[in-house]
Amino acid sequence: MLRTVNRVLLGLAGLVLLVIGGSVLAVGLGASPPSWWFHDGRRDVLLSAADRTRWRDEGWFWPTVIAVLALLVLLALWWLSAQLRRRRLGEVMVESGDGEGALLRGRALENVLAGEAETLDGVEHAQAALRGRRTAPRARVGLTLAPDATPSDTLHRFSSEVLTRARDSAGLASLPATVRLRGVRHRAERVS
């Protein structure tokens, strides 16, 4: 959901910037804009001389404008790097015994973790995601528990059975995991 909202907002911001920039370029090249448009002629400027020199006597204005614009550029670059960063681990290095190792797809190990977790008693749904380095992955697991499940027992069985089996089969020294437990919503039972 958040990814969809992020993409829609990015698309809208890009569309607005493209329309405004394209219209200013078109007017600058000689196209006639509608009467209500803010930039109405080839010789018109976006900031008039009066607007640019209004705060000339104030020593704080231009450094503040430059600082705000620099902060906006830094925030935009941080946001862009956050968008481009890979959130999930693509592959895991599995020790094959020959000294070279083999690569296991991260999604495959995530699917196995989630599938085996769903076979545990009391687990309605499971999701898994791998992060970290391919030689030292970390798992983030979300378990949705049934109404009659005991969280401590389910967590113990997950760590001792599912996580241990995944760690041993991948030949990893350790597979740290963050497990989030959530109860499934259910109607209250009637007591008579």
Image (spheres, rainbow, N blue to C red):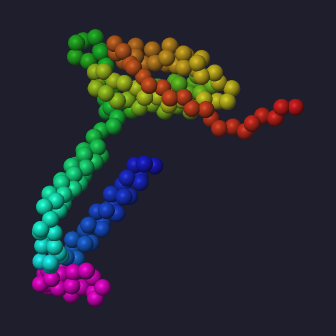
x then y, percent, for residue 1: 46, 49
Q: Which residues are magenta?
A: 25-44
Q: Is residue 190 left or right of residue 161?
A: right
To which quarter of the image does residue 62 belong? bottom left
Judge whether residue 26 is colored magenta: yes
Most common SS among magenta residues: loop
Q: Residue at x 33, y 24 (%)?
A: 137
Judge whether residue 37 is colored magenta: yes
Question: Vertical placement of 75 versus 171: above or below?
Answer: below
Q: Residue at x 17, y 85 (%)?
A: 41
From where the camera sits, is residue 22 visible? Answer: yes
Q: Is residue 4 left or right of residue 157?
A: left
Q: Residue at x 63, y 21 (%)?
A: 150
Q: Is residue 5 left or right of residue 188?
A: left
x then y, percent, for residue 174: 36, 15
Q: Looking at the picture, tell me which residue is in the foreground, 146 or 61.
A: 61
Residue extending furthest right?
A: 192
From where the camera sits, is residue 93 visible? Answer: no
x then y, percent, for residue 160: 50, 13
Q: Residue at x 67, y 30 (%)?
A: 147
Q: Looking at the picture, tell me which residue is in the foreground, 61 or 123.
A: 61
Name the image quarter holding the C terminus: top right
To which quarter of the image does residue 165 belong? top left
Question: Vertical placement of 9 versus 37: above or below?
Answer: above
Q: Is residue 99 left or right of residue 111?
A: left
Image label count: 0
x then y, percent, for residue 45: 15, 79
